[in-house]
Image (cartoon, rainbow, N blue to C red):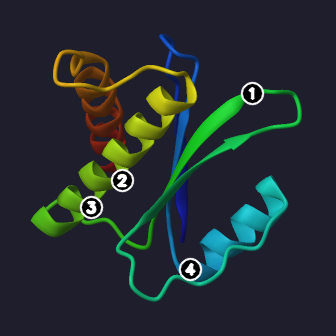
Amino acid sequence: MAKTFLIPEKMYHFPLRVFVGSYEEYSAYCKRHYGFEEKEQQFFGGFSFLVTYENGKPEGFIWLPKFDSASIGDIGTLSHECIHIALRVLFKLGISVTEGNQEPLAYLHEYFFTEALKKLK
């Protein structure tokens, strides 16, 4: 049974949806909610992307085929996908990540990761 939840994000107004379920469930969800069929990924432990709805509202999305809160590998995969989303959000907003400007990335990644982890435990 798939699990999905939304993490609101107030600073940049970029919420994050996390979906944990089989590829088939994920693909059907993408078709139903985003209007596209996802191509099967044979080599990913997870996948992430940004969408913008017709009303202009953006959303980050992470798919994990499975999640076990006792698995270091699954926790690492969640963190990995959260950093992708945090970087994409900042790039989309024109916020540069440089040696002198790392805090926006660090804080956004930490927020997405810890909020997702709380909901998945």
Quadrant containing the N terminus is: bottom right
The residue indicated by pointer 3 is 77
Q: Nearer the viewer, mark 4 or mark 2?
A: 2
Residue 18 rendering spot, x and y as whole percentages? 49, 50
The CA span between labels 4 and 2 is 16 Å
Q: Circle 1 sits on which residue? A: 57
Q: Name the side, left or right, on which 64 lies relative to 120.
A: right
Give the amino acid type for the residue marked by disc 3 in the picture: Thr
**10 Å crowding of disc 4: few (<14), some (14-19), many (20+):** some
Residue 74 quadrant: bottom left
- Asked where in the image residue 112 lies, by quadrant, the reply is top left
The residue at which mark 2 appears reads as 81
> Do the numbered discs 3 and 2 sit on residues whose CB atoms are within 8 Å?
yes
Residue 21 position, x and y percent, is: 50, 70
Identify residue for label 4: 23
**N-terminal label among 4 and 2:** 4
Q: How far apart, in angstroms, are the residues tagged by discs 1 and 2?
A: 21 Å
Q: Please tell me which residue lies in front, 7 or 54.
A: 54
Query: Distance from label 3 to label 2 (Cα)?
Result: 6 Å
SS for callout 1: loop
Residue occupying the point 68% across, 32% down: 58
